[in-house]
Image (spheres, rainbow, N blue to C red):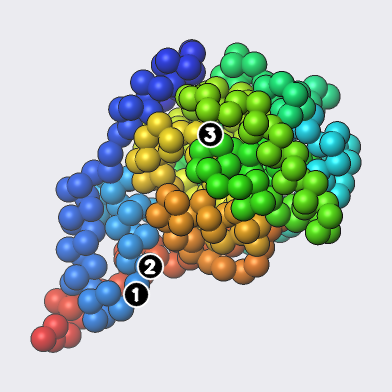
Amino acid sequence: MNITYQNPAQITKLLADLPAPDQNAIDKARARQAQLTKPAGALGRLEDLAIWLAGWQGCEKPAITAPHCIIFAGNHGVAGRGVSAFPSAVTAQMVANFQHGGAAINQLCALAGIALDVRALELDRPTQDFTTAPAMRLDEVISAMQSGADAIPADADLLIPGEMGIGNTTAAAALALAVLGGAAHDWAGAGTGLDDAGIEHKAATIAAAIKRNDGKALDAVEMLAEYGGREVAAIAGMVLAARVRRIPVLLDGYISTAAILPLWQSNPAIFDHCQISHYSKEPGHRRILEAVKMRALLDLDMRLGEGSGAAVAFSIVKAALATHNGMATFAEAGVDDG
């Protein structure tokens, strides 16, 4: 199924009419869990994960045979303000590293059996400095969202969106502040390794960006245009297209979660087909998860990005499926269920 993004109004309409999980499959998967040879609830969140997947796959015993991680890379004009410990040239250098198999995400995907793809989005044309102008035009946002939708392989049955972009924790923080409020200091973290003075400067930069639109109501596409990046918009476009296609999504950390906030502002149900893989070390990530009432699967003090936390958490998903599908029921095992 091809998803085509046409204009902001059409995207708003898609968000207003999100597909729901299959309740019949959920009921059957839950009933199966109740019959397995264990005390009720003894596998905790593994049980919840299996039932969640059943709902999106529409079957009692779901399976994942084609997991895909797609890394989107983009450059940010705001990086010119010194909000990162690394220069923008590192974005393209890291894309080359992904392509040559040298990054953390390459090793983690290989270990977990996840197919990996990398999509560089106009790295020679950074977004605008969003302290002085919108980061992107609306048509640029829609184009980036389409890149996210088009990157979904036809056989994908679970997606991990990854990202690379010097300056993109600043974009994530600006989106979080714009959607959830608070102070810029609530959302600004060390990113690639800023010291305390660097974090203060980053917070001031974010506050300056938000001040441009003080009190102005923005829809999802406008929000991404003001504060996002091409890779951020691509993640939003992928997640929305995945929802239309009923493909479960395993989100990584701060940036990939913040990318969904403009969609969440339009319809809080957007996260229903997503799991948060881990709590990022970036302080704003926990605040986002508290606001959207979601729990991460792991807490490993990671803040690398690239989809790395989600690739690690995928092993938890596989464990949920292995126990759900492979365990015997009380009747099959001849065990008294009390």
280 relative to 141, above or below? below
- Residue drawn at x 64%, y 16% is 137
Callout 2, which amino acid? Leu
Q: Say which of 2 and 79 sits in front.
A: 79
- Are the two marked residues, 2 and 1, in contact with CB atoms closer than 8 angstroms? yes
Q: Is residue 118 left or right of residue 36?
A: right
Which residue is depicted at the point 68% across and 39% down?
207
Q: Is 67 rendered above or below residue 242?
A: below
Cα–Cα gap, marks 2 and 1: 6 Å
Who's the residue at 58% across and 42% down the image? 177
Bin the neighbour count of mark 3 within 10 Å (Cα to Cα): few under 14, some 14-19, many 20 and up.
many
* Residue that badge 2 annotates: 46
Question: Label 3 belongs to which residue?
Answer: 236
Q: Is residue 132 left or right of residue 300?
A: right
Q: Could you tell me the amino acid type at mark 3? A: Ala
Q: Sequence order check: which comes first, mark 3 or mark 1? A: 1
Disc 2 crowd, CA 10 A, few/some/many (<14, 14-19, 20+): many
Could you tell me if the residues under marks 3 and 1 are in contact, i.e. CB atoms within 8 Å?
Answer: no
Secondary structure under the numbered disc 3 in the rendered image: helix
Q: Which residue is mark 1?
A: 43
Residue closest to the eye, 39 or 74? 74
